[in-house]
Image (cartoon, coloured by chain):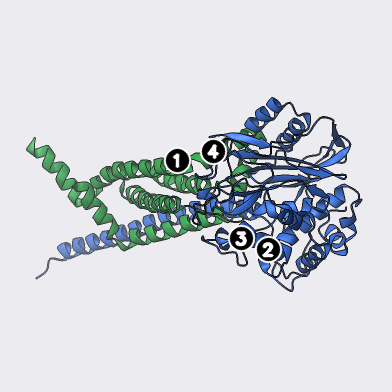
Amino acid sequence: MVDPKENLEKEIKEEKKEEKKIEDLVKSLKIVSWSALVIGIIAIIVGILAIVSLPKTSASANVTPVAPVVTTVSNASFSKAIYVNGSLITPNMSLPDAPVITQNQSFGSRLTNINEPLNASELAVINNASDSYFEQAGLMLLNGSINDVGVQPQKAPLLIVNGKPSVIYLGAISCIFCGENRWAMALALGRFGKFNALFKGYSSFGDGDLPTIYWAPAEYNISSGVDFGNFYNSTYINFISMDYVSPIVQGFELQPLSYFIQKAESTGSAPYVAALQLISNLNNFQGTPYSIWGRFVVPGADAVDFGNVNPSQPPLPLEYMTHDQILSQLAHPNDMFAWREYAAADLYIAMTCASINNTAPICALPAIQKIESVYGYSS
Amino acid sequence: MAKAKTFKYIFTKKFYLLEFVLGSFIYSIIYFAIISTNKFMLLSEFSEVLISLLIFSSSILLVIATFIIKSASKPSGYAGGVYSVIVSLLGSLFVSCGCQAPLLITLLYFIGLNAVEASYLYTFLASYNAFILLAFIIVNILLIYYYLGMASQYTKEGKKEILGKFFTK
């Protein structure tokens, strides 16, 4: 015979056990849901911030490009200009401590021809690029057949140096994007004036070792410094350029803006100091490259162009190209790499044209005028 | 020994294993979202290994912290869980500092820094992000060790060892 009291106790015990199990389950579910909620909220915040600061690139083919909104960084009057008089910096044509390296080296760790000036025919590729290439690339950009080119500029007051508006560039020789972006910049600047000299260069070994051009011979051996100035002449604009220099055989390095200001002050060039003060005051510096094209700040490169195909992972096709191959592509564009460079240059040209009231002949190009209006630069 | 057994005990439970996998997945998504704010990110193999280790160790820490939260009668373990989330977020932000760091610098401007101050922090992080990640990983490992000690109070093996020590004395 089973004692009913014992039976009841057993049942109560089992029930309690069940209750405890359910309680435990509820407790663990609560913890899981709270953890998921916290992680979810954080992920949403990060996601929103990521989307907000995501650089805008043009959409895929067959999509009418939407003009990016030109934003102002504060209520300051950007219609006002900053006037500065003073001499620009003309660097030395060669540096004894950073000689031209003539021996052939292997990709990824090559400095072949670094600091070598471009010869006349190479320089002509930049200075005398045909308007038809800019027109063709501009039309391709507008009809959406070129991707990975696009920019969301912010507004800035014009920096007028010695009576001419300025293009300001701040970069680093070690930086991969600066290396890629200088090609497009040079093509764009070549439409408003001429480079009397440009130099072969590379991004740092840790940042792709991409072939690029330098505005001036680079002190690629020193631990830290800034190379100011260039050999550019134009009747329409000034070009104020500065590149942070660090050992090219290492990785990407940069110093804070205060370092650039201090170095600029030591040169005694009022336009360079004014340019850096402007960059500081705008509060939109996000790293290198950073450029101001008249009234437009481009906080980054305006294209992703590392070869005919932009891979998501290294190696990049551009890493395996030589200066000669790039110049040859730019001289006779017939692939996506070259068209993207010209399209990226078109955006810079359109911003500059909008800032100088379209006074340069290149501004009359239909594609440039269309870009100005579609991208909202002329408003 | 109790710590190793506790670790084994926790990670053989389906619930915690699932939490580890989900935690790693969410931390990875956060990392990819952050680095996608750069147009293109060229990460060295060393940095890739470091960020993977950081995500991995943060997820382990999260799981152990959850185990303690679930098992303890008094509130404890929350700090480890929060730290795990924060450290993986910061690690992802810091590793995204290359030529450009749009998200990090936007955040710095948002909290009131000016361009010069923001550039100080950005250039510092861009130069030393590998060392900072390494430091985060070491702190994670130390915290995992500490939390495993705490967690062992709530497992059979841990209790046995504690009692064993007590009675042998």
> Could you say whether the residue bearing mark 1 is in a helix, strand or loop?
helix
Q: Which of A9 and A281 lies nearest the eye of the viewer?
A: A281
**Residue B44 image point, x, y percent:** 47, 52
The disc label shown at residue A221, or none = 4
Q: Residue at x 52, y 57 (%)?
A: B32
Q: Would residue A85 be found to the left or right of residue B20 on screen?
A: right
Residue A58 visible in the displayed image: no
Q: Nearer the viewer, mark 3 or mark 4?
A: 4
- The amino acid on which the numbered mark 3 sits, given as a three-letter code, is Phe
Alpha-carbon neighbours of circle 4 within 10 Å: few (<14), some, or many (≥20)? some
Chain B colour in the picture: green
| Residues marked 2 and 3 touching at CB (< 8 Å) | no
Q: Earlier in the sequence, mark 2 or mark 3?
A: 3
Q: Earlier in the sequence, mark 4 or mark 2?
A: 4
Q: Which residue is mark 2?
A: A328
**Quadrant of the rendering where the N terminus of chain A is positioned:** bottom left
Q: CA distance from mark 2 to mark 3?
A: 16 Å
Chain A colour in the picture: blue
Q: Which residue is mark 3?
A: A306
Q: CA distance from mark 3 to mark 1?
A: 29 Å
Q: CA distance from mark 3 to mark 4?
A: 26 Å
- The amino acid on which the numbered mark 2 sits, given as a three-letter code, is Ser
- Are both tags, 3 and 4, on one chain? yes
Q: Residue at x 81, y 58 (%)?
A: A375
Q: Which residue is mark 1?
A: B132
Alpha-carbon neighbours of circle 3 within 10 Å: few (<14), some, or many (≥20)? many
